Each structure stands twice: as C-alpha cells, then as structure tokens.
Image (cartoon, helix red, strand yellow):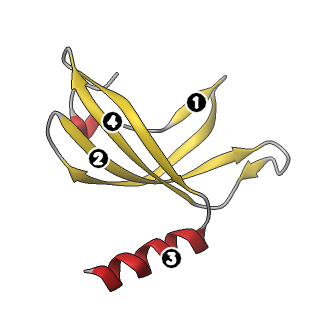
Amino acid sequence: MAQTIDEITIKYEEDDQIIVDELDKEILTRGAWTTIIFKYRQWDKKLDDFGPDRFTIRRYRKMKGEYKQQSKFNISNKEQAEKIVSTLNRWI
C-alpha cells in the first residue's frame, strides 16, 4: 500500500507480465481523501497485446498511514470520455 499520494499506482503485474500498464495520472485532490484520474491500458490475452487506452477515476482515503482505495469509476471507452469532457466544458 502507498504511504504517500505520489506512490499510488494502478500498475499491476502477474507472473512477470504487466496486466495493467499505467500510462499517466493526474492528482485532482490531495489530502486524507485524494482523487486521481489514471490513463492506462490492459493486457488482452486474446490479442496477446495491450488493448486501447482506458481511463479511471479513483478515490483513496488515508487510514493508519496508508492510502486505500475507497471507490472507482471506470470510463468505458473514448466516446464516453469525450462526452464527459464535453458536458463538463458546457457546465463550467
């Protein structure tokens, strides 16, 4: 588990194979509760390669000196991401 916000990652390996490859992250809020948006790609066994870029927003809470994931929202595809951006741009 991560003790600092900057240590938080979604990169995941299994048997020396990267399953979730974190491409980028942006820390949206800092503190005991932190929110981070990640850009990543996931290994696709059928393709024997990584799939398309994906995005996820995750909330973490610091408890007993470590950040633990409390919730997440996975953006299912590029079109959904564009719609979220468009809506937020219109609202603000």
Judge depth for marks 1 and 3 and give the one in front: 3
Residue with the mark numbered 1 = 13
Look at the picture and state if 57 lies above or below 87. Answer: above
Q: Is residue 45 left or right of residue 82?
A: right
Q: Quadrant of residue 52?
A: bottom right
Which SS class for mark 2? strand
For disc 4, the marked residue is 8
Please state which amino acid type lies under the numbered disc 2.
Answer: Thr
Give the amino acid type for the residue marked by disc 1 in the picture: Glu
* Furthest residue toward top: 64
Which badge, 4 or 1, is on the more N-terminal residue?
Answer: 4
Quarter the C terminus occupies: bottom left
Q: Nearer the viewer, mark 2 or mark 4?
A: 2
Q: Earlier in the sequence, mark 4 or mark 3?
A: 4
**Callout 2 environment at 10 Å: few (<14), some (14 to 19), or many (20+)?**
many
* Disc 4/disc 1 C-alpha distance (Å): 15 Å
Q: Which residue is mark 3?
A: 83
Q: Pick whichever, 90 or 50, lies toward us.
A: 90
Q: How many marks?
A: 4
Find disc 2 in the rendering and name its residue.
Answer: 35
Give the alpha-carbon distance from disc 3 to disc 2, as whole Å: 20 Å
Of labels 1 and 3, earlier in sequence is 1
Please, what secondary structure does the residue beneath circle 3 have?
helix
User: For this view, does 22 lie left or right of residue 66?
Assistant: right
The residues bearing labels 4 and 3 have C-alpha atoms spaced at a distance of 27 Å
The tag earlier along the polypeptide, 2 or 4, is: 4
For the point 69% across and 56% down, the residue is 51
Cα distance in 3D space between marks 1 and 3? 31 Å
